[in-house]
Amino acid sequence: MASRQRCSSTPALPHVSALTVLLEAQHMKSIIHRLIYVARISPERANCNALPEHYERLFNRLIKSNLGESISGLLLLYPSCVIHMIEASSEILTGINQDLIQIQNQGAEPLLQDIKILVISHNIQSRLFPQWYFRIVRLPTKYLADFGNSQSEDSVVEECLTLMMKLGMFLSKVLKPGSKGPGENLHDLVPELLVREEIICFLLRSGRFLSPEEFTTMYNKPINSPVTSDLLWPAPQLPDL
């Protein structure tokens, strides 16, 4: 009886273990990005609890569809505007950005208006917050008519982002996982680290920042766009000199 021989015609494929796939997935989930945006609160929807409740529902939905991931950050609510810092994976930030687009398209009375993305920092080394918090800010507001005239937009943006980072570093030292977050007297505890409301309003009037929809369009735009001559065949002939 002829002995059975293994067929050796199948090319050898690289062996990838289940552990390797798991570790790669965990590595991708561990890459965290940070989003900071500002927005105007609609006067008809100026309810202190409406926006936090909206985000709590949104975050719960995003976490359920992205198991093993978490969302951290800080939402500061002022009488007329907000500034929001969010730390999460790219998949979750994409979902949040899509939600911001939907908010602006809610009709005559959206929850937020004039949403402007200040910055997105990729692959941050560590989170500033153990979880997501929100706080109402009650700082004396000085609506100076000439605010910003003596400063460049770059300096105002730098001041705003620097204050948010310093506030995050301060809170990272005092907040513990599972805590309820900073107390209601945050404006009394570290008033010098809170972005003033008139600064946010100044940034909202600026035309240099992208809306969530504009950011999505730019993000999805191909890097290398073919020119018309690349699509012609045969290639056009140059005249003889």
Image (tube, helix red, strand yellow):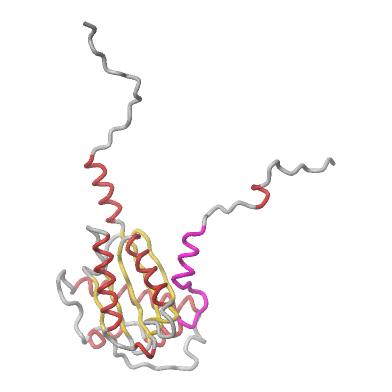
User: What quarter of the picture does the N terminus occupy?
Assistant: top left
- Find the residue positioned furthest to the right: 241
Residue 111 at x, y percent in the picture: 37, 82
Q: Residue at x 45, y 81 (%)?
A: 204
Q: Depth check: give the residue in front, 226 or 188.
A: 226
Q: Is residue 66 above or below residue 146?
A: above
- Find the residue positioned furthest to the front: 1
Q: Is residue 217 magenta?
A: yes
Q: Residue at x 46, y 67 (%)?
A: 215
Q: Residue at x 29, y 90 (%)?
A: 138
Q: Is residue 234 above or below residue 150?
A: above
Q: Depth check: give the residue in front, 36 or 158.
A: 36
Q: Depth check: give the residue in front, 29 or 109.
A: 109
Instruction: Classify residue 103 by image quadrant.
Output: bottom left
Residue 25 at x, y percent in the picture: 27, 49
In the displayed structure image, the side of residue 157 where residue 128 appears, left or right:
left
Q: Is residue 52 magenta?
A: no
Q: Which residues are magenta?
A: 204-221
Residue 56 at x, y percent in the picture: 25, 74
Q: Total label count?
A: 0
Q: Depth check: give the residue in front, 65 or 68.
A: 65
Q: Is residue 116 above or below residue 237?
A: below
In the displayed structure image, the side of residue 129 where residue 209 appears, left or right:
right
User: What quarter of the picture does the C terminus occupy?
Assistant: top right
Residue 70 at x, y percent in the picture: 24, 63
